[in-house]
Structure formats: C-alpha cells, structure tokens
Image (cartoon, rainbow, N blue to C red):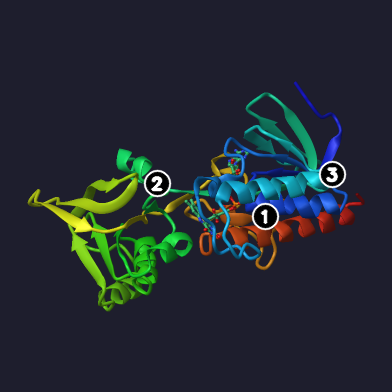
Amino acid sequence: MSENINILQTVIIGSGPAGFTAAIYAARAEMNPVLISGMELGGQLTTTTEVENFPGYPEGITGPEMMIQLQNQAEKFGTKVIVDKVTEVVFGSNSKEFHTIKTSSGNEYQTHTIIISTGASAKYLGKEFEDTYRGGGVSACATCDGFFYRGRNVVVVGGGDTAAEEATYLAKICKTVYMVVRKDYLKASKIMQERVEATSNIVLMYNHEVTNLKGENNLVSQAVVIDNLTQEEKILDVDGLFIAIGHSPNTDIFKGKLDMDETGYLTVKPFTTETNIAGVFAAGDVADKRYRQAITAAGSGCMAALDAEKYLTSIGH
Ligand SMILES: Cc1cc2nc3c(=O)[nH]c(=O)nc-3n(C[C@H](O)[C@H](O)[C@H](O)COP(=O)(O)OP(=O)(O)OC[C@H]3O[C@@H](n4cnc5c(N)ncnc54)[C@H](O)[C@@H]3O)c2cc1C
C-alpha cells in the first residue's frame, strides 16, 4: 500500500537529536519534511535520566523530556512524524530520479532527498545486571555520564581503543578506574596502551570479567569480578560501571548501497553531510564514530537540512 503518491521533498530517517534538528531546519525552509522515527522514538537520549551538557539547559533535563521538546519544535513548523521503521531504500541513480523508502508497516515514500540519522547503538555485554542498574550506575558513555562519578571509583569494561579512551577520560574525574580486561593484553593502539599504563589511578585487571553488580535501590555500590584463570572472585567498591566494548552503527539496510567504513559507519564528503549518492545525506552518530554527542548530532542534522535544501534548489525544487 502506498500512503504517498506525491514525491516528497525530503524524508528524514530517525528521531534522535540529528533527525529532529534536521526536521526543524527543513520545515522552516518549507521542505515539508516527513520524519520516520524508527521504533525508538526520540533516539538514544530517551534511555538516560540526566542530560547536563546540552547548551540551554543550565539545570539539566531528562533525556525523554528533551526529546519531546525537540519533537514539539519540529512539529510546530510542520514536520510530519510517522512512527514506523524503514526496511529498505531503493536509491535513484541520478538527480532526475527519486528515492523510494519502504517501511515495516508496508508504506512506501518517494522523495527527492533523504537525511539518514539512524544513530549508532552502544554494545552491551547482554547480562541481566546491566538492565537492573542502567541509569543507576551502568553507562556506555564516559563523556556523558563521567561527571556524575567525580571523585568516586568506577569500572571500565573492555580492552580496545574505546575502553582505553573512556578509562583515561574517567581517570581525570574519578578517584580510581578499574579497567577490567577479559584477555591478558589490551587490543587498544600502542599509544592508547601507553597512556593507560602511564595513568596512576587506572588499575588494569587482565584476565578478569565482571559477573555481577550489587547495590540498593538500583544504585551500584559494588562490582563482582572474577579472575577467569583462577576463578577467584573479588569485590570492587565502585559506584559506576562503564561498558566500553564499542558501538554498532544502524546501517544494515544500507549495506552494499552507500559508502561506509570498515566498521559500518556511513562516510560523507569532508565538511558536508553528502553521501556518495546524490540527494542522500547522513547526520549524527550514524556517520560519526568520534564525537557521538547530542550536540554534535544536532549540529550535523542542521548541516544535512541545509545541504538537502541546496541540493533541491540545484535540481529545480
Ligand atoms: C545512556 C546514554 C546517555 C547519553 N547521555 C548523553 C548526554 O548526557 N549528552 C550527550 O550529548 N549525549 C549523550 N548520549 C549520546 C547521545 O544520545 C547520542 O550522541 C545522540 O542521541 C545521537 O543522536 P542521533 O540523532 O545521531 O541518533 P540516535 O539518538 O541514536 O537516534 C537514532 C534514531 O534512528 C532511528 N532508527 C534506527 N534505525 C531506523 C530505521 N531502520 N528506520 C527508522 N528509524 C530508525 C531510531 O529509532 C532513533 O530514533 C548518551 C547516550 C546514551 C546511550
């Protein structure tokens, strides 16, 4: 079934800070944007209780509240928000053609431009304790949540570059950072390894794994770790557990169709949001493995809307 037979000017895929910011700009530029939200309306920030680093909220704001405000702002200027999931995109091969978006509810949308802002999901260990203590000590973002643990002890799980970066960042804020590494070596680049080893308040625990968390009222106060060679159990007095085992960009539906790097992040032309296909733009975490913040996602959402608007003008729309 086709809901729209007209060719739209722009469709935004994803409802995080990148998608809604793109929508605000596109709507105010009379591009009549349709935003397909995905199943996580509001994106990653809806899973956090406190955002203190987004400019304009000196008292802080909860993630869900902030995302409702962004949605309201986008809708106020005329964005049509559709709660649905994109399952396939058929890209037109030149600017005279349009792109077709198919969704899980069976709708199809034809559009001259697409702004992809499908985000990247943090990888978790898949253990029950992560769900129990999420928002009460378990995090996957040191830049976002490290400040809440200043002067306290935390655990970082992982041995790659992400973990080494998170541990060195947290070491500047926290008292002690236990870096729990499953193997007997760090996978991180040499320079990051050296940085970790040279930081006096990072305690490296090779051949260890976190098996459980303890605490009251869903607030972490201890981590149970096990030496995976001797099976010896140890208790660490910590208030936070940072899972740093990487992120997965939500780009499966674009594989083989859009240029991406070896880890699946969409690649764009430098200083723009342009992908390798004319009229298709990428914004936010889906094309950014470096910063992954709400403000940078919002900034690139703005860029994508401006790029799309320029493109529409260039093809006479
Ligand atoms: C627990 C936590 C706390 C955080 N705290 C902070 C903080 O305090 N400050 C900060 O700046 N950043 C924080 N971040 C990071 C921040 O949330 C992200 O950088 C930001 O949300 C990225 O925005 P985005 O728009 O690129 O993508 P996301 O917010 O990830 O949104 C992606 C969107 O794409 C949609 N989507 C995915 N696939 C499809 C599909 N096939 N079809 C349609 N839609 C799809 C999803 O439903 C979702 O709406 C935090 C992240 C987490 C996980």
Please rate how many residues cluster around mark 3, counting C-alpha atoms within 10 Å: few if below 14, some from 14 to 19, many from 20. some
Residue 9 vertical position relative to residue 236 in the rendered view, above or below = above
Residue at numbered disc 3: 32
The quadrant holding residue 163 is bottom left
Sequence order check: which comes first, mark 3 or mark 1?
3
Q: Residue at x 65, y 67 (%)?
A: 270
Please rate how many residues cluster around mark 2, counting C-alpha atoms within 10 Å: few if below 14, some from 14 to 19, many from 20. some
The residue carrying mark 2 has its beta carbon less than 8 Å from ligand 1: yes
Say which of 167 and 73 sits in front. 73
> Which amino acid type corresponds to the residue marked 3 in the rendered image?
Asn
Residue at numbered disc 1: 275
**Element on which disc 1 rests:** loop
Sequence order check: which comes first, mark 3 or mark 2?
3
Q: Residue at x 57, y 52 (%)?
A: 286
Q: Which mark is residue 134?
A: 2
Left or right of 179? Residue 137 is right
Q: How many marks?
A: 3
Q: Position of residue 228 (x, y in %)?
A: 14, 50
Say which of 97 and 110 sits in front. 110
Q: CA distance from mark 2 to mark 1?
A: 35 Å
Q: Residue at x 54, y 62 (%)?
A: 52
Please rate how many residues cluster around mark 1, counting C-alpha atoms within 10 Å: few if below 14, some from 14 to 19, many from 20. many
Q: Which mark is residue 306?
A: none
